[in-house]
Amino acid sequence: MATFLLEVGTEELPADFVDEALEQWRSRIPKSLADHSLTPEDVEFFGTPRRLAVLIWGLPERQPDQEEEVKGPPAQAAFKDGKPTKAAVGFAQKQGVAVSDLEIRPTEKGDFVFIRKTIVGQPTADILQTLVPAWITGLEGKRFMRWADGDLRFPRPIRWLVALLDSEVLPIELMNGSQGCKSDRISQGHRVLHPEPVIIPHAEEYVSVLNAAFVQVDRAKRQSLIRQQIEASAAEVGGVAVINPALLQEVTNLVESPSPVIGKFDPEFLELPSEVIITEMESHQRYFPVLKQANSDELLPYFITISNGDPAKAKIIAEGNERVIRARLSDGKFFFEADRAVPLESYLPRLETVTFQADLGSVRAKVDRIGLVADLIADQLKITGSDRAHIQRAAFLCKADLVTQMVGEFPELQGIMGQKYALVGGEPEAVANAIFEHYQPRGANDRLPASLTGQVVGIADRLDTLVCIFGLGMIPSGSSDPFALRRAANAIVNIAWAADLPLNLAQLLDQVIANFERSFASVMKLSVEDLWQQLQDFFLQRIRTLLQEDREIDYDLVNAVLGENDLEYTQRALVDLLDVRDRALFLQSIRNNGTLATIYETVNRASRLAAQGTLATTQLDPTQVIQPKYFEKSSEEAFFKALGQLHNQMQGERDYQRLVEALADIAPTVANFFDGPDSVLVMDPNPDIKQNRLNLLGILRNYARLLADFGAIVKS
């Protein structure tokens, strides 16, 4: 068994590309080896700002030999009077075998000539020489560049290649115009701490040799070390570090030999909102802020940086960092004081100069639309009094901070600064909080808005965006979603579910679409009907995904509550978002506790037969459609009586637990109707008797449909 090392040495790579490249290699290299019948014992991937590497352990010396069967011409064409024809001779020559090795075998299309031959496995070294260049040049990403006079593209110039099969250099060359980069055993250590070349004697020694040259090539170990250094440095100044996962990931890919540097800033800057200081540090400087204590927003006047330089120069590095952050925080202080010198409302006219979308006008116009949609939601939820006034005020001010100097400098502070400036300007706390909350959730793991005001304004903002952008025909396709419409639809559903808001989304879509048509008829790319259909399908797909992935509901149960090509279920899901959630969760719970299995057969059998009748799925009163005069068996009378009890129990209520208990109670009666000593033939020759029996089954089916389409449920 052999060990293979590939290291691609470069100028400093973009931090995000390191992770992207390693992820691509993780999926492609094992598959590439498997496609060539090579199965290693283990594959390790390494990455730093100056190198990407893969270490492949336990490779066989060569491919295994393979037996191959090749089908040739028909026997009649290959042999004539028992002698081989030109077709047989030519086939044998092409396959590199003697004519005597040919076999005749029967197939569905007659007798054919076959040959079995052994394909000798190639040496692993030869295969790797073919595969490795494609591993490198096949990497994909943003901002690739060319250098020298060639066409080779990579995020940064490639400066060296290491390719070792055990202790032997595997000859590989990447040509780039008139220049080439040939493989060797010579790597490079840390640019500052070990500027001399590094010789790697054996592939297995790669990690230890680079460690000795002050390069920690293992990304996971490097990140763990950085986290420990940050936490220890924060404790050293009596605080707790703010470790943003995205920043930690970025910093990990910017250093090869991390060392912590503690810096400080003037305590007077602590008068700024902590979000401003943290954003200044993280976004612009890649500094880690320090809190007084965990779960607090009170900062200490310190920060931590991770240096890739000489630890002996930490003091000089800290002084340089401190000069930079002092200037940045001075700018932030100026912006903050200038912004809050005037009321938040005074920024609204400036929103007219900010374009939301070319055909949809300014952000100021969007603010007016958000207010209209928020009114529709408030009407639907019957919100009155101060809550309604707060919703309107928050909708009016929710985008005002976009044109402040602070948000102009740090767009990620939108909403956050709006909240601060609203409070300074004397706005009610509910309004200020809603300005911040209406952006939530900002990302996959962010909180949902906690207040009713924030929830309504957040839904209104997103609903306006969805209808308007869809109305322009700009519907997300594949991975393209520049307006984050999938996230917007997910947020609307999640906010309603988390806050138990009884939203009729179908009605809201109707109303917002009507408003859009009145205002933007000249730029509409879809008819009202098509726009409604596209949005309906889009929301249903989001609901389906949220139920399956976030709520972990089985796919067939999701199908059962949303219906498959069943308009009644589709409309019901959008009319009552809470109901579709509750039915899915309830179905999953009764599957898990076994209750579903006790009613599944009864309901499913009844539903299949009822489909052959004409009873409307909305009919629930057995006395209106079933005529006892057509009963011939006592089982029919018992079934009718049980349906009457079911009808009286439910009384139009959507109590799904009571419904399932009632269906379980009726199951033995239905079983007797089908298979007991007094069973009936449902499809009786007499059409009146037949329809009466189908109506009995139809009423049962209709009650089951209050919960779900049992026909979509897979028997477990």
Image (cartoon, rainbow, N blue to C red):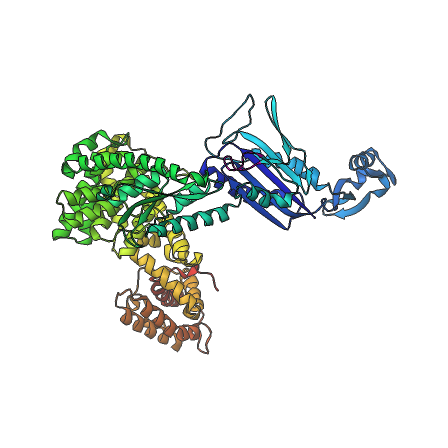
Q: Nearer the viewer, residue 663 or 633?
A: 663
Asked if 634 appears above or below 74 in the picture, the reply is below
Name the image quarter holding residue 104. Answer: top right
Q: Main secondary structure of the magenta part?
A: loop
Q: Position of residue 215 (x, y in %)?
A: 53, 41
Q: Which residues are magenta?
A: 188-196
Residue situated in front as seen by the camera: 187 or 121: 187
Horizontal relation, residue 234 to residue 222: left or right: left
Q: Residue at x 35, y 72 (%)?
A: 661
Of residues 495 and 435, the one nearer the viewer is 435
Camera-side residue of 35 and 496:
35
> Could you tell me residue 455's position as x and y percent?
24, 50
Locate residue 564, reporting x and y percent. 41, 53
| Residue 518 in sight in this render | no
Q: Image height check: is 681 above or below 173?
A: below
Q: Position of residue 190 (x, y in %)?
A: 52, 37
- Please indicate whether residue 496 sits to the left or right of residue 222 in the image: left
Say whether residue 211 is magenta: no
Q: How many marks?
A: 0
Q: Residue 469 appears in which quarter of the rendering?
A: top left
Residue 645 visible in rendering: yes
